[in-house]
Amino acid sequence: MTSELHRRVFPRRKGWVYVWRVRHPVTGVAVRHGYIGKTRFLKLRLNQHMERSRWRDTATEWDVLWYSSDVTAFGLWWREVWYILTRMPLYNYQWNRLNPRRIPIYEQGRRSAAYWLARSGEQHLSAS
């Protein structure tokens, strides 16, 4: 009975902790730990980052830091926190505020907007 209740309260499913490698928006230097996240649906989450993230213009590639086919939500959460605390990524906000290299959220948006404005101008020039 206890084990059945435990399985219902703490379900175990697949989970990933992933990292995005990026180029630094100012220097252009490759950054190994640009953003670290966790997910239950890897492909969906990676696509969401490419559509909505403020730093998507600097992303170069992604990699899996950790995977389990049998992990609880808490187990997945603490692994993400541990990787953020030990790797100090460039764009994470939560659990990363003491990182002196971190780019604040308001800066990410400003840099991204400037990038996309410049890109749209380039596309208009090349179309004519």
Image: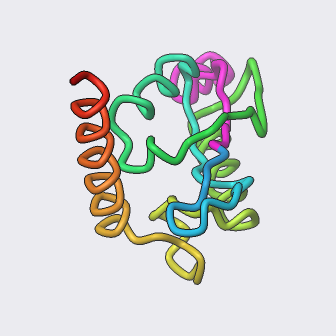
Is 115 left or right of 28, judged from the image as shown?
left
Q: Picture quarter containing residue 31?
A: bottom right
Q: Is residue 125 magenta?
A: no
Looking at the figure, which quarter contains the N terminus?
A: top right
Q: In the rendering, at what x and y percent does residue 27 appear? A: 60, 68
Query: In the image, what residue occupies the spot 32% across and 41% down?
Result: 119
Q: Is residue 30 above or below residue 126?
A: below
Q: Nearer the viewer, residue 93 or 128?
A: 128
Query: In the image, what residue occupies the spot 56% across and 82% down?
Result: 98
Looking at the figure, which quarter contains the C terminus?
A: top left
Q: Picture quarter containing residue 49?
A: top left
Q: Which residues are magenta?
A: 1-20
Q: Is residue 125 above or below residue 44?
A: below
Q: Is residue 15 magenta?
A: yes
Q: Picture quarter containing residue 60?
A: top right
Query: In the image, what residue occupies the spot 54% across and 67% down?
Result: 95
